[in-house]
Image (cartoon, helix red, strand yellow):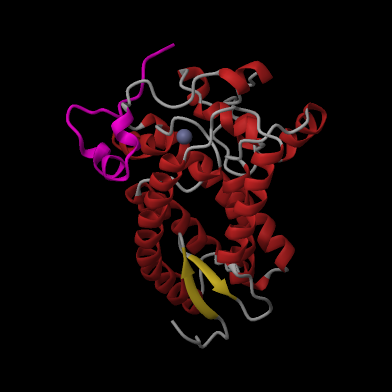
Amino acid sequence: MGQADSGYNFKPYGFAMIEVGPSFFIDLTLVTLAALTVGMLLEVLLPVRDGVISIVRWFNNAGLALVTYVCSHLFGTFVAAFILYSAEQGAVLNLTKWPLWLDFTIVFLALELTRYGTHVAMHKVPVLWRFHAVHHADSTVDISTSFRHHPIEAIISTGPLTAVIWLLGSAPEALILYRALDLIMAVMTHTNVNVPARLERWLRYMVVTPAFHRSHHFAEKRFTDSNYGASVPWFDYLFSTYQPATLEQQKYASIGLDTHTVNEQRIDSMLFAPFAEPLKAAPHTKA
Ligand SMILES: [Zn+2]
């Protein structure tokens, strides 16, 4: 969108994120590719589940991710324009004037809480679950699951995030730092890796570990409806939505949704699944 009066060079990326600030630059595409590379290496060196490798599954997941990326990029252009306009007008709280570390801390906590709340809503509100179920219908979890989201889910999620960003009026540097971290964590939390137990025990107090998030993908409902955190697990601990799983369960528990057939693994079926009647992606009832 070119150079703005504020000195920022705004460029939308994914959901309403701004790529270039005046003091530093982060290439978010490179960050994503680096995270995928590290994730892939970990999956080869230290896998937790067997039989995850499937070229057909990867092709379909990557295809859906690409469609979602293009849609949210186009939508993000409008959102970024809105945020640019708001920043120039002066946002409600205007954190831009605060030290970057404080701005980042506030925006990080606010967006993580927003994403936690949105994720809970995706599970509890039937019409939202239709779209989010496409992510959960993956038959196993690895780095290719990271960006397997229905485009409409991505667009819906942008709403609450944009509202919070607009309210806070954070500096683009704080937003880009958050988005870079968020992209790394989106990949890491879906990686099919067996983090050594001693490290995992400590890590899961600070970040959403692959095991913490993998159990969110278990077919058994008490696991699916728990561990909602995106990058940090704190809100699951705070609101009692945390559910631990054993290593045995991490290795062998059934992943995906009972109600989905193999057809919903194809890119075209994934795109149309939320609109199917009767609802194929209904919340499963298995206890
Ligand atoms: Zn979920």
Residue 276 painted magenta? yes
Image: 180 above or below 212: below
Farthest top residue in view:
287
For the N terminus, the quadrant is bottom left
- Number of marks drawn: 0
Residue stretch rendered in magenta on the structure: 262-287
Q: Is residue 76 left or right of residue 114?
A: left
Q: Compare residues 258 and 224 and report the one nearer the observer.
A: 258
Q: Quadrant of residue 171?
A: bottom right
Q: Compare residues 79 and 214 and report the one nearer the observer.
A: 214
Going 34% across and 32% down the picture, which residue do you hit?
125
Going 26% across and 37% down the picture, which residue do you hit?
273
Residue 277 painted magenta? yes
Q: Compare residues 53 and 10 and report the one nearer the observer.
A: 53
Q: Is residue 197 left or right of residue 121?
A: right
For the C terminus, the quadrant is top left
Farthest front residue in view:
55
Q: Position of residue 34 (x, y in %)?
A: 64, 58
Image: 103 above or below 128: below
Image: 33 above or below 144: below
Q: Position of residue 143 (x, y in %)?
A: 55, 44
Farthest left residue in view:
277
Image: 207 above or below 49: below
Q: Position of residue 252 (x, y in %)?
A: 57, 18
Going 44% across and 30% down the picture, which residue do you hit?
139
Q: Compare residues 210 and 24 and report the one nearer the observer.
A: 210
Q: Position of residue 164 (x, y in %)?
A: 50, 56
